[in-house]
Amino acid sequence: MSTNSSELLFRSIPSVDRLLSEPCLDELKKTYSHELVKRIVRLALDNLRADILEGSAREHDCTPEAVSNRSTILARKILGPKLQMVINATGVIVHTNLGRSPLSDRVVQRIAQAARSYTNLEYDLEKGKRGDRNAHLKLLMQEL
């Protein structure tokens, strides 16, 4: 890519302020804070500038819509879920690299229930004071 076309592309990059006022970023702004969206847009613009220097960017990559799309993809990559479901075909049931073994629906429901509220994790309800977090397992471990 020639220097003149690179310069034109650099000049056509919209400013962060302009991008933040564009409706094409409304979905990101509904999901994330203003400061986080601003950081993501800046990263997307940095990536666009690198693409221009590399010669892989074109004029349509510099539109607000294209930068918005780039920002959305970047937000999903950075902030989206990282863990994916996989099939354990290794023959090892409790596989440490694959998250050990799956939990039953009943256990998952109990974990979700406990995660939605406060619990007595380190509080002894009978004594009304701080307790031992392992006390909940003591009787079960003795049975085993």
Image (cartoon, rainbow, N blue to C red):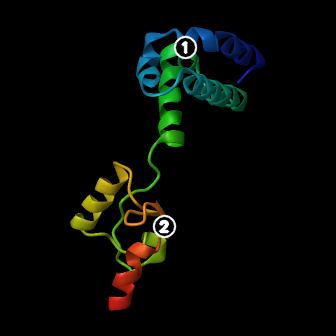
Instruction: Kindly identify which residue carries mark 2.
Output: 131
Secondary-structure class at tag 2? loop
The quarter of the picture where residue 48 lies is top right
Left or right side of 17 for 115: left
The quarter of the picture where residue 136 lies is bottom left
Q: Position of residue 88 (x, y in %)?
A: 35, 73
Distance between mark 1 and mark 2 Cα atoms: 50 Å
Q: Quadrant of the C terminus?
A: bottom left
Secondary-structure class at tag 1? helix
Crowding around mark 2 (Cα neighbors within 10 Å: few <14, some 14 to 19, many 20+) is some
Q: Position of residue 139 (x, y in %)?
A: 35, 83
Instruction: Answer with mark 1 or mark 2, whichever residue precedes in sequence.
Output: 1
Instruction: Kindly identify which residue carries mark 1.
Output: 20
Which residue type carries mark 2? Gly
Residue 132 to residue 75: above or below? below
Residue 144 visible in the displayed image: no
Closest to the observer, 32 or 139 = 139
